[in-house]
Image (tube, coloured by chain):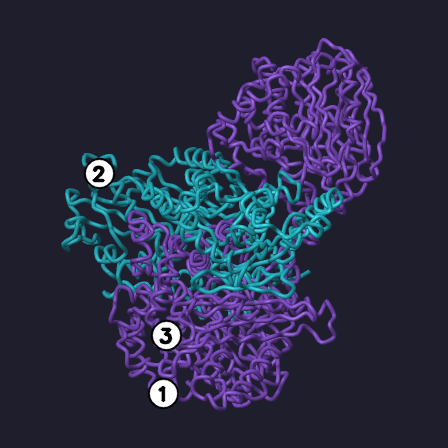
Chain colours: A purple, B cyan
Amino acid sequence: MMFGSVAISYRGSTLKVHTLRYPPQLMLTRIFILKSVKDSQLDQDSIEHNSSMVDLSTPKTIDSSTKNESALAHSLPMAIPNSPSRSKDSESGIAGMSGSSSSFFTPFPSPCSSVSSTSSSFSRRVLRSQTMRMDIDLGRRRSSMDSGHTTQDEPVSRRRNPKIGLAIVIGQGKDGSEEQADKFERFFFSHFSLFESHFQKLTLVVEKALTLQRRTYITPLFEGLEEFRNSICNLYLAPRIQKPIWLDLMSYPSQRSHLCQHFLKELMSELDQHNTLNTNFFVSCLLTGVLTHHLAWVPTVMPAGVTPNRAYLDKHSSTFLDTLAKSHPYNPLWAQLGDLYGSIGYPVNISKTVIVGKKAETVCRFLFILSYFIRCSEVYEKQEKREEIAMEYKRVFSFDDVAEFVLMPSDQDYESRHLDGCTMSDEVLAASAIGDHAEGSGYLSNTESNDLETDSHDSNNLYRSSSVKTKTRDSGIASSIEHSSDCFDHADDFDVQWEQSNSNAKLKNFKKDRRFTVSEGDYFSSSDDSKHTSPISNRKLTETVQCLPVVNFPEKTENEISVQCVDTRNTTMKDSSIVCAHSDMTLEVKCENVVAVGRAPVRTKTLNFEELKLTKHLLKSGYVPPPNSLSKSVKLYPDLTNAVDSGDVNEIDIPMVDHSKLVLKPDVINSPVEETLSCASQANIDKDTVVDKDTNEITSGNSTPTLDTFTGDNLTPVTESLTTPKVHLHRSYSENCGYDPRLVERGNSVISDISLLSNKSTISNGSSNMDPEELPFMPTLSIGNSITPQCSHLENFGRSLLGGYSPNYLPDFALQGLPELDKSKLRSEIKLSTQNSVLDEPIASSMCIVADTDKWTVELLSSDMENRAPAVIPPSKLVSNLLKSIQELWQLKLAPDSCLMHLEDRLQEIYFKSTLLTDYLKSNCKAGIDEIQSRLAIDQSDIPLLLSVSGVHSSHIVYEHHYRTWSSNQQQQVQPSSTTEESQG
Amino acid sequence: MMRKMCALKNDNLYKMNAVMALCHFCELHGPSILFCTQAFHAADPQDVLDGKVKKNSYYPKKRSRSSSTGSASSQPGIANNPKTELCEACRSFQPGQPGFVSSDHEAHISYVSMQYPDQPQLFSIVRNACVRSLSCEVCQGREGPVFFGDDDHGYVFSYTFFIKDSKARGFQRFYSIIVVMMDRIYLLNSWPFIVKNVRTLIGELQTKAVKVYEQEQTATPQRAQRMGQEFFTKDQFFRRRGGGSTYRSMTDLTDDKNLFRYIHMTFTWVLKTGSSRIVEKVLQGPPKEETVVDLDKEEETEEGFIKVETKLKEAETETPPNEEEFLQHIPIEMANPLIVEEPCNDNGPVFTSLRDLRKVFGSLNFHDLAHHVLIGNQIIVRSQHLNTINSLLNILKSILPNGCCKLVPFSEKYQPSWSCNFLGLPPFTGLPPHVIENEQYILLDVLSPDMCPTNSNRLCVTEDSPFHGYGINMTSSQPLPDKGPTILAKIESILDSSHFTPEVVLTYLVCLQEEWMNKVKVVYKYSRTGKRSEDEMEQLLKVLKTEESDQQLLKFWKTGLSSQYRSHLLTSNIGTQS
């Protein structure tokens, strides 16, 4: 399993995940090539990290400009859709694309830089979506990878190097309880990036052991394994902050005032106690560090462009992200993780915060407070389920002039095919034929259908009505239409008859599973009332079966309608007769199990309002539209039946074509027929056996079944009007294809997408058109509350990586409390984490804010600093002022809510200040610290903070340009002792 | 032809983040892609946000034709295979049959199903995934989910399964459903979701196949037949191989003509739902007060059209009796009716920036002027050049928050201060006496050189600027205290600095304004919640680092708060109390 059954020629490292069933286990595998000893370095395993590694190992010696370039190239390998380079690509074609990798590394200003206020969080997500897309950029990503490969392993050395497979098997719960296993599985997959990074570390250990310590490799291997095991256990089991305040404020707006109060109380008590000279202004320092490095707060204070609605909200969730997520899916979990680590600025850093202290209570309070400032987006999971619709559907055809049709089968078929350009396959044709219900029960026996035939034949009428009988074989194979030559060959398999019957109209009832029912206009009989009784919301798919008469047409002379319903489920035939008060017609309805496969074919015909009115009018005037128009049939795609149907519909407002010739016309054959899918609520069906014609008409155009359609008052018997049916077919049945927007919402399931299908179906327009057949979307059922915040830590980084007070250091956590900290271990861990990016993108540096509540110090450990002593974080003046004023306002008894708003306002001021600084630096490239201090009235202590913030909202080029020269100045001149903040890049 | 296709492909019409495919291990042809669904996205995210996406622009119409039908000829992998070599079992679409498409016009994505992805690169990736999923990667029991992949070939979720076939070797055929993405993290995050749904689909397929299988077995028990049969003769063997009849398509195996439609719809659903399954909520900061105020104003013009009318009428009714007084009170002594011209928009000199204005006015005068502006006194400008008035007023406006500015750039007659704090008038327009006596205002006259500005209390511009030779007369209702608001000093220091580009100056002003607006907000909030003693108010002002001289400014700026903000405060306070 690890290597697969066949060797893969691929040279890079491969990642695999297997699930083992008994007992439930997950297996994570990595296969990589062991490099020769000379080449082997700790961090060369993964190509992606190469560049960052160079950065790390030689931070001082490499000339800054070249270093920047390389970092640029690798950290931002993304495309800008409409950049010049792209257009060049499009001219040169793919080859050009993959060849000129440099053109891909377009500078940061993202495609969306015009969305000024939201550039950071937005562009980050856009870029992610773009990087991961699968066509053009594929080439880009690959080409960059390829270059890495070629430089890295030479073909010759490859052959010498063995492939190593490393697998970890993780058991899911000892007790074997399914729930536990399921929980862990969810955790595993949602936190996969963390698992992967640990696994990567383990891989490095193995690699090192195998190359450098071949004789004693077992020991380090087991050590590595032990560490891996511990990390995973800790990750899964460590205590978390139960109520991270920022996320709770977002998730539970109703509790806002309470949460505000609670948070401010905690904050105030800490400010009172621990923001004094005795404690080195601990809170200010801590907050300065956190705000400087956990930058996700910046987007939350950046002013939104325009208020989306009238309601002024203190903060509102951004709508553009919703739009983006829909059109260019990215991974919200990934985005959330980046937020938490503060890796949203430039350069990309990973930051963590550790509060150390023996007094658990104090530490926990700080953790709680910081959970307001260490922010991230909230992630929700929509619990949705695909609505099960049966795979087969039944179709009833009705042609007016059966005889003629039958007489000229093959020619017609040939012709139609020919005209189609061979687009219509047998399959299509066959599919359009009546299908069997998936369950296979309740098929009509041949004899039954024959009976029907005879009945219809017996009746002689002046009016032609078409009745189609479908005989389905027991095997459940759909019978094909006569139409296709194949079908003719197997005449026995199906029988579709075109009859002229005046007196007896046959209705076929289609039964659909669930609410997708084909509804036949006036003759809506529901024999399965009992099945429809369940409330919509609670319905199960299987519960609802609807019986809808599909095809036939009552003719004027005969007044009796008898409905024969077959409950397919039970394989029982029920006879029920529906008597329409005003009509004497008899409807004979057969119910079959119909599966609605597609709810709405794209090429459905929509009746527009006028048509409807017209129809109605005609009906009242005694004009009877052809049966098909009244009836609703499910159709997936254009077929003969549909054509006929549509023809009927069109007949009303359009001059008719002789239907007998209809068959001969290719376009008719291909043409999509009006589809009548309607979803009837069961309750209504129960009550009204007859469906209003209007309703049907309306719904007929829609591809989407709606419950709503039938719920209205429209269900009134109109049958009386159907006295004189004239059946005419119109050629242009396809013109009004579209969906009725009303059908968008069905029951509790949202099918907004369905309504959006284009009105014009290309397919219907011409037989020669080869455009793909348009199909509707499957309906979605939401399970439970459609959107609920993920408040467990299982699937939400925001809740899982804000740790509580735990005995051990936990490398993954963005925030955590500890009694003690081993700094050397932390240091090495930080360094490692730079090499194994959890974010799947290169990281410039990794840092950890260590706040000691015993000694009241706040220090920063950075992977940049090598072996230097941790730097002390000085309090920023802006931050201390902010805290002070909040404190004083609180003392003045300003409402907690207002205090918090003021806090946000002040954070926004910091943001504005940083824009000022950025703007200034843009025009004054060589500005020094003193200059900034004097001219911009920015305190020196604020500069690191402001620069950091600039990295979030501003083009990194400007930032970078000034930052380098400038931070070095600062280090030397101003803060020789503490270079920490400035050197973050 | 090929070139053209390349161009089309790079058309940037589509992007996809995942491809979902059904693969089959054909007894004759080995692993093959049977059916494949891709998502095509609108090109530019920005367009989507701006609502610029044209319908169907993300829907690769032209290409799709070639894709489904002519795939065989354009695919690198199949290029050498004439279509006829594909047996039924390896085929989902008949030659010439178009693919399927479902379009989500809201999100601007179309999901297109074809037998193969028609882009060579993508084809090779999917093909690679297909081969690996069916013949390389193993999972326990051979049926089940596996994840594998690398950076070059993308990452693949594969679920392998068997379908019953009474005529196949071992009475079953081997299939897999794969999902290919470049984003392995996303793919793995979606694992539980994908497994659940793919498993359901496979279950459905298998159920159908079993039914067919059982029927066929009852009809002609294959096992018995095969047992009784002698071992293949060579002849038979080749017949079996060559004859395609044994290699039945999945449609036949399940006896479902619509199988691939159904699969398309299911794949589409999985892709669509899978990409929107996890939703993210990101908070943004509140919009700048200015933006909100702008919205406020827009609304006023919509509903308040009539109001404005009435105001004007009132003003008219008031003014006639005063008309005589007007003339008497023209504060400019040099008024010479002969020179009076109608204000024109043509060639008057304009102020380009605050700095420019300050230079023309001189720093002292500017100080006074800005002071008046900041505390909300009415600024009245009289000039014969409309563009001069406009530029002057607009520049002065920039030091005030948007909400505080009520601008009437030009009016024939005096407009009261409650209706505007910036007013442009034609030269020599008189002010009503009550205004002169009671109101706080500053009157600026910009006099062209031909008006002979020689009076001593006028400023004569001597500098080299468009205003050279112009006279500027400032008359204020009453002297202001020496000490201006704190913000004024800052503004002046900004203007003093020669190092700031105009852009920086603007940013700086925004900074200052927001800073002071925040103070104003606190004062407003504080005074709105409960009664506060004077002491407390004083305390508050101290906390906010405001001084006595800022009082007027705070008071005035309060009027600039948008109505939205006010109502928001009101509701939020209610919320707090409850």
Eyeballing the image, is A358 above or below B291?
Answer: below
- Residue in the picture at 22% in, 59% down: B362
Q: Amino acid at mark 1?
A: Ser
The residue under label 1 is A977
Q: Real-space Cα distance between discs 3 and 1? A: 18 Å
Left or right: B361 as drawn, with respect to A323: left
| x, y percent for residue B366 | 28, 58
Q: Nearer the viewer, mark 3 or mark 1?
A: 3
| x, y percent for residue B130 | 51, 56
Q: Are marks 2 and 1 in contact (CB under 8 Å)?
A: no
**Residue A750 picture quarter:** top right
Residue B480 visible? The answer is no
The C terminus of chain A - image quarter: bottom left
Mark 1 or mark 3, which is nearer the start of the sequence? 1
The residue under label 3 is A985
Q: Are marks 2 and 3 in contact (CB under 8 Å)?
A: no
In the structure shown, which secondary structural element does the residue marked by tag 3 occupy? loop
Q: Are marks 2 and 3 on the same chain?
A: no
The residue carrying pointer 1 sits among few (fewer than 14), some (14 to 19) or many (20 or more) residues within 10 Å by Cα, namely: few
Residue A584 visible? The answer is yes
Q: Amino acid at mark 3?
A: Gly
The residue under label 2 is B346
Judge by depth and name the residue closer to the eye, A9 or A241: A9
Judge by depth and name the residue closer to the eye, A323 or A28: A28
Left or right: B222 as drawn, with respect to A229: right
